[in-house]
Image: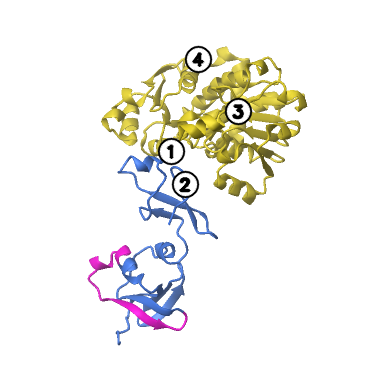
Chain colours: A yellow, B blue
Amino acid sequence: MRSLIDIIDLTVEEIDELIATANDIIANPDKYAEKCKRKKLATLFFEPSTRTRLSFEAAMLELGGSVLGFSAANNSSAAKGESVSDTVRTVGCYADIIAMRHPKEGAPMIASMRSPVPIINAGDGGHNHPTQTLADLLTIQREKGRFDHLTVGLCGDLKFGRTVHSLIHALSRYEGVQFVMISPDELKVPEYIIQELEKEGIPYTETRSLEEAMPTLDILYMTRVQRERFFNEADYIRLKDSYILTPDKLETAKKELSILHPLPRVNEISVAVDDDPRACYFKQVMNGKYIRMALILKLLEVA
Amino acid sequence: MKIDSISNGVVIDHIRAGKGMELYHFLNLDNMDCSIALIKNAPSQKMGKKDIIKIDTELDLDLDILGYIDPNVTINVIKNGERVEKFHPQLPQRLTNIIQCKNPRCITSVEQEIPHIFKLTDREKGEYRCIYCESKAKN
C-alpha cells in the first residue's frame, strides 16, 4: 500500500506515468467515469481549504466513487483531543483512501504510518503539498511540453509557501532547470533548501526585483503572502503588497512565459492579467482535479 | 587509583571529562548487574582529563548512539582479557527519542505519544532533521 506524503516519494518515472494518465483522462473522460465505483474517499481537513477539498471530492466523483469527511477540526473528534493516528485508524474502517490536510507539519506522515488505507497529504502546515505540485507539473508539461531546461521564477512568499518548496524539490530532478527566487528578504527560501540546491549543483539566483528577473523567465510561479503564516500582523501588512504582477510588468516578459499560481490569490496578480494568454492559473486548477484523479487511481491500484 | 582490568566487555575511553555520568545514564548502565567502573577525571596525555567507563560483560548495545553524544570517544572491545576491537562510533542514521523536535509547528509538539525520530542528513556536519517536519535538530 502506498501513500503520498512528499513529492519526492514519487520517482520521475511515476510522475511521468501520473501525467500520462491525467492527459488520457482529459482526452477520454468517459473511459474513467466508473473506475472507482463503490470506492470511498475520506477528506479529513483539520484546517479549512475549500478548493483543495473540492478538487479531491470532484476528482473522486468523476471517477464514479463517493466522498465523506469533515472540513474543519472543530467538526471532528480532534476537537475532543483524539490523535491523528486514532482518527485515521477509525476512518480507515469507512473509506478506501484518505486525503488529509493538517495545520501541523508531519501529521500526514504519522497518519500514513498508522493508517490501514493510503493517505494523500493535502497540505501539512507550511511543509509539503505534493498534489499541488503534481497540478503544477501537469500544467508545466501541458504548456511547455517538457520539464528540462527551464528558467523558473518563484515570486512572493518563498519562506512559508509550501507549494514553492515542493515544486523546487520536484523540478530539481530535471536537467538544465534553474531557479530565480524573487522575494523580500523576510520571505526568502529557507536555508535548508538553498543548501540542497548547492549540494546538487543546481543553479539559482536570489533577487528582490520582479522587474529585473522578468525577461529571463520561462515560468513565473506567483504565490500569496499568507496572513495565517505570520506571527505579527504588522509584518504581514508591510509585506503583502511587495510583489504584484500587472500587465506593465509583463511587457518585458517572454511571449512563451507561463504564469502559474496555486490560488487563492489576494491581489498579487492583477485581474487585468487574467486575459493574457500567458496566464495559466485557472487551467492549473482544472489540471489539479485531473492529476488527483490519476493519483487516486494509482494509489487504489485501479487499472 | 587502581581499577582491575576486565576480561570480557567494553571499555569506553576518551570520554570528555564530566560527560561520563551522562553516558552512564544514557546507556542505562545502572540497570546492569555486572561490574562497572566509571572513572572521572583520569589523566590523559591527549585531553588533559578524561572519563572512562569499563563494563565487565559482553554488551548487546547500539554503541553508535555514543557517536551522537560524544563523537570523540573510543570503544575498546575486550575478550579474554585482550583488546580485540577498537573503534570510534559512527554517527547513527537515526535517533529515536534521543532529542526532541523544537519546531512549534511540528506534529510532535501537540501529540505526546509520537516518538521523536531524527535522521542523519549531513554526516560531515553531523546534521540531523526531524523525519516529520524536516526541521534541523538544535543542540
How many other residues sit within 10 Å of disc 3, few (<14), some (14-19) or many (≥20)? many
Q: Residue at horizontal 50%, vertical 25%?
A: A297
The amino acid marked with disc number 2 is Ser
Q: Does A153 lie within the magenta span?
A: no
**What x and y, as percent, mark residue B7?**
32, 81
According to the picture, the residue beneath numbered tag 2 turns out to be B135
Q: Are marks 4 and 2 on the same chain?
A: no
At 36% across and 42% down in the image, what residue appears?
B109
The magenta segment is B25-46
Name the residue carrying label 1: A105
Separation of residues labelled 3 and 2 (CA atoms): 25 Å
Instruction: State the SS at label 2.
Output: loop
Mark in the foreground, 1 or 4: 1
Disc 1 and disc 3 in contact, CB within 8 angstroms = no
Residue A285, quarter of the rendered image: top right
Identify the disc placed on residue A136: 3
Instruction: Point out the image quarter for the N terminus of chain A.
Output: top left
Tell which tag, 1 or 3, sits nearer the viewer: 1
Chain label for disc 1: A
Q: Amino acid at mark 1?
A: Glu
* Residue A92 shows in the view: yes
Out of B80 and A67, give the one closest to the viewer.
A67
Residue density around tag 2, few if under 14, some if 14–19, many if 20 or more, within 10 Å? some
| Side of A180 where A62 appears, left or right | left
Task: Report the amino acid beneath label 3.
Answer: Asp
- Residue that label 4 marks: A62
Q: CA distance from mark 1 to mark 4?
A: 30 Å
Q: Is residue A179 above or below residue A265?
A: below
Residue A199 position (above or below residue A126): below
Q: Secondary structure at mark 3?
A: helix
